[in-house]
Amino acid sequence: MKNRILTFIIGVLTGAIVMTLVFLIFNKPNGNKNIENFSPNGQMQRPEGNMGEPPEKPTGDMQMPPR
């Protein structure tokens, strides 16, 4: 019985190590694909082009009725 438990624990630990290595190898950062949205001081830049007008703010009472 102790032999089976020890084998199970070794298998779980080995699997965890292998999966961690696979995750680290295949989940590399994709470089600087979002770097164009940031200025050198790290703040977001506005996108270029016409964004259009924002939607109108609704008028009237926006409170929820009591239950």
Image (tube, rainbow, N blue to C red):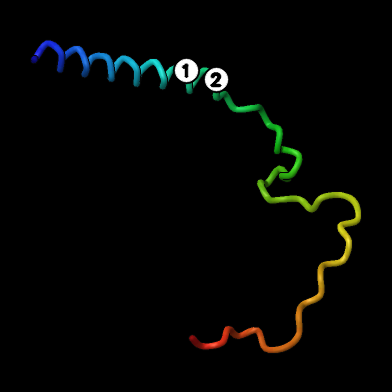
**Location of mark 2 (residue):** 26
Residue type at numbered disc 2: Phe
Q: Residue at x 86, y 49 (%)?
A: 48
Query: How many other residues sit within 10 Å of disc 2, few (<14), some (14-19) or many (≥20)?
Result: few
**Residue sitting at 51 percent across and 88 percent down?**
66
Q: Position of residue 38 (x, y in %)?
A: 71, 44
| Quadrant of the drawing holding the N terminus | top left
Query: Which quadrant would residue 14 be assigned to in this image?
Result: top left
Tell me if residue 16 comes above or below residue 57 in the rendering. above
Tell me where residue 30 appears, x and y as whole percent.
64, 27
Q: Is residue 52 above or below residue 41?
A: below
Furthest residue toward left: 1
Left or right? Give the position of 66 relative to 3.
right
Which residue does the numbered mark 1 point to in the structure image?
A: 22
Does dot 1 land on a helix, a strand or a loop?
helix
Asked if the residue under mark 1 is in contact with the one under mark 2, i.e. CB atoms within 8 Å, the reply is yes
Which residue occupies the foreground of this view, 51 or 1?
1
| Distance Cα–Cα, label 2 vs label 1 | 6 Å
Q: Nearer the viewer, residue 49 or 22?
A: 22
Measured as percent of width and height from the top left, residue 51 is found at 86, 57
Q: Nearer the viewer, residue 25 or 36?
A: 25
Residue 58: image tag: none
State the SS at label 2.
helix
- 40 up-or-down from 14: above or below: below
Amino acid type, residue under disc 1 in the picture:
Val
